Image (cartoon, helix red, strand yellow):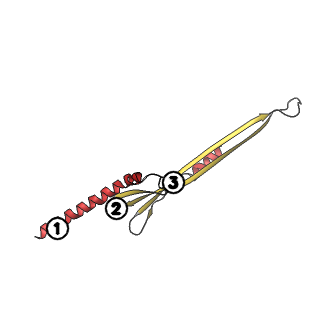
Amino acid sequence: METATQKIREMVDVNTIVGTPITTPDGVTLIPVSKVTFGFTAGGSEFAPKSKAPGDKNAFAGGSGAGISITPVAFLVVHGESAKVLSVNPPPGTSTDRIIESVPELIDKISGLIKSRKKDKDDSDFRT
């Protein structure tokens, strides 16, 4: 079990869960995020020896196993001052759930539009 645990530690480090950032030429940074699941099992039993000779010890039978699963779940997208999480497999849900998830992005777009219009108005006031 100690050897198996050590090998899993070597395979699963922080870079497995939160991956190495990837920067695109236009300045967008993508950071992959994964889910890591692992488990162990072990068991054994002793059996009485077939012969009854003095000094015969019980026979032992045992086994162990381990498994690991690494599943990509999302990408963190960073562009300028904004950050967004893009799910690899969007959770099943209703249209209402999807609308609620998009509210922060909608607010950002509306705020940007208002700032843009205010800047245009200020620029036109300056020219007159």
Q: Position of residue 94 (x, y in %)?
A: 43, 52
Q: Tell me the tag on residue 30.
A: none
Which residue is depicted at the point 58% across and 49% down?
9
Asked if residue 93 is positioned above or below residue 79 in the image, the reply reads above
Whether residue 23 sits left or right of residue 121 in the image: it is right
Asked which quadrant contains residue 59, the reply is top right
**Can you say whether 58 is above or below 111 in the image?**
above
Q: Which amino acid does label 3 sit on?
A: Ser
Q: Which residue position is annotated with label 1? A: 123
Q: Do the residues labelled 2 and 3 touch (CB within 8 Å)?
A: no
Quadrant for the N terminus in the image? top right
> Could you give the CA–CA distance between mark 1 and mark 2, rounded to whole angstroms?
24 Å
Q: In which quarter of the image is the C terminus?
A: bottom left
User: What is the distance, in whole Å, between disc 3 and disc 1 at their CAs?
Assistant: 47 Å
Label 2: how many Cα within 10 Å (few below 14, some 14–19, many 20+): few
Mark 3 burial class by Cα count in 10 Å: few <14, some 14-19, many 20+: some
Residue 80's disc number = 2
Q: Residue 92, how many percent across, how many down?
A: 48, 52
Specify the quadrant of the image occupied by residue 102.
bottom left
Q: Which amino acid does label 2 sit on?
A: Gly
Is residue 39 placed above or below 45 in the rendered structure?
A: below
Residue drawn at the location 32% of the way across and 57% of the way down: 106
Snapshot quadrant of residue 99? bottom left
Identify the mark at residue 34; answer none if there is no mark: 3
**Residue mark closest to the camera, 1 vs 2:** 1
- The residue depicted at 68 percent of the width and 41 percent of the height is 42
Image location of residue 116, percent across then percent down: 23, 64
Q: Identity of the amino acid at label 1? A: Asp
Q: Is mark 3 on a helix, strand or loop?
A: strand
- Upstream in sequence: badge 3 or badge 1: 3
Q: Which of marks 2 and 3 is nearer the N terminus?
A: 3
Q: Is residue 7 shown to the viewer in this render?
A: no
